[in-house]
């Protein structure tokens, strides 16, 4: 399948999705929302894909909703409908994809793009990257999962401050606050993200996926519920090829050959 607003490349178990509207700082129009959602759905179905990297082309990760498209559409679609049929499907697709997603945050992430960046599982930021809840500058509230994801990562006071000030939070502060896992020199971001993705794709990706499900579910339940659910998922992991292989490799003092099965 060919795409017009993104680049999509699969190599050695790693799918790389590159937001590709650099002249608009990779702002999301409807086509881009649909195309990114489609590649995450494809990544979920394709057994060859065991890790996904999401990044942007040019100097930005993404500037969020395309405000030209927003204006052009006028009242033909309400914002609520647009969110429900667009960004919500994308965020849910990412959050339920049982394969690790690395966000390689190459530049500014603004508005809805903060929600999309936070819906990745681990984030590596270029030292030139930043995060901006641009919504209040245009009289909107945060959306695209930001109200759920961001306070969990950095606490409500910082999240609310980001929302009402629309300040750009630089990568080093995002790291200190727990929004990103690593900050690396901008020129090395692609290489470092690819190396991490390659190593994850060669890992026990079934267990990685079940771990994501367990941790997401744990937000919704009490301790007893979380313990019960992790025991259920561990039954599945414990019957996998990768569990047998990992234990055998340990006992035989060799490197495990995981298949994600
Ligand atoms: O529809 C719904 O469902 C509602 C959902 C809403 C979710 C949202 O995301 S709301 C928030 C939308 N995003 C913004 O408000 C951010 C707008 N952009 C900016 O504030 C700035 O561009 C940045 C702070 C991100 C970067 O500033 P700077 O100075 O580095 O770049 P620039 O000069 O502003 O932008 C460069 C070009 O990209 C420029 O085009 P030009 O003049 O060279 O032809 C600019 O118009 C364009 N651009 C940047 N952001 C957007 C955009 N074009 C359309 N939509 C954008 N979001």
Image (tube, helix red, strand yellow):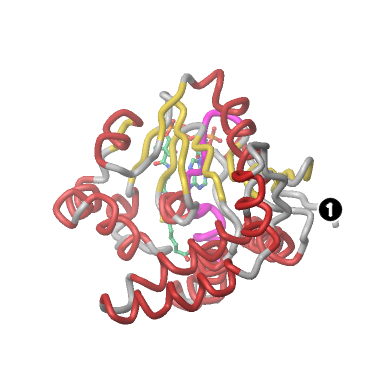
Q: Nearer the viewer, residue 194 or 208?
A: 208
Percent position of residue 135, x then y: 33, 54
Q: Does any atom of ligand 1 lie closer than 8 Å to the CB of label 1? A: no
Q: Quadrant of the C terminus?
A: bottom right
Image location of residue 39, percent across then percent down:
70, 58
Residue at the far left in the pictured view = 157
Q: Nearer the viewer, residue 132 or 102?
A: 102
- Would you place residue 176 above or below residue 203 in this image? above
Say left or right for 116 vs 156: right
Say whether residue 124 is left or right of residue 97.
left
Q: Is residue 21 above or below residue 147?
A: above
Residue at screen point 62% across, 61% down = 206
Magenta-highlighted residues: 58-73
The residue under the point 41% across, 45% down is 110
**Residue at the location (65% across, 55% down)?**
32
Report which residue position mark 1 lands on.
2
What percent of the width, then of the height, locates residue 38? 70, 63
Closer-to-camera residue (77/156)? 156
Indicate whether residue 64 is drawn in magenta. Answer: yes
Instruction: Please check the rendered image and state whether residue 106 is part of the magenta-colored stretch, yes or no.
Output: no
Which of these two is toward me, 154 or 260? 260
Q: Which quadrant of the view contains residue 196?
A: top right
Say which residue appears at 54% left-offset and 68% top-offset: 96
């Amino acid at each position: 399948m060919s795409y017009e607003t993104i680049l999509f490349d699969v190599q050695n178990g790693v799918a790389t999705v590159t937001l590709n509207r650099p002249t608009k700082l990779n702002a999301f129009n409807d086509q881009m929302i649909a195309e990114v959602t489609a590649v995450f759905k494809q990544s979920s179905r394709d057994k060859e894909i065991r890790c996904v990297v999401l990044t942007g082309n040019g100097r930005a990760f993404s500037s969020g909703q395309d405000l030209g498209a927003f204006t052009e559409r006028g009242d033909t679609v309400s914002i609520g409908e647009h969110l429900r049929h667009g960004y919500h499907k994308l965020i849910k697709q990412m959050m339920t994809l049982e394969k690790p997603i690395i966000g390689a945050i190459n530049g500014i992430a603004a508005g809805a793009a903060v929600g999309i960046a936070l819906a990745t599982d681990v984030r590596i930021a270029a030292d030139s990257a930043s995060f901006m809840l641009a919504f209040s500058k245009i009289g909107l509230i945060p959306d695209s999962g930001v109200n759920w994801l961001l306070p969990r990562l950095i606490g409500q006071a910082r999240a609310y401050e980001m929302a009402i000030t629309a300040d750009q939070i630089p990568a080093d502060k995002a790291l200190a606050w727990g929004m990103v896992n690593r900050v690396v020199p901008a020129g090395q971001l692609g290489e470092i993200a690819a190396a991490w993705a390659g190593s994850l794709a060669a890992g026990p990706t079934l267990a990685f996926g079940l771990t994501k499900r367990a941790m997401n579910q744990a937000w919704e339940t009490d301790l007893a519920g979380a313990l019960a659910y992790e025991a259920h998922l561990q039954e599945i992991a414990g019957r996998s090829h990768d569990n047998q292989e990992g234990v055998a490799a340990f006992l035989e003092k060799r490197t495990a050959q995981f298949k994600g099965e």
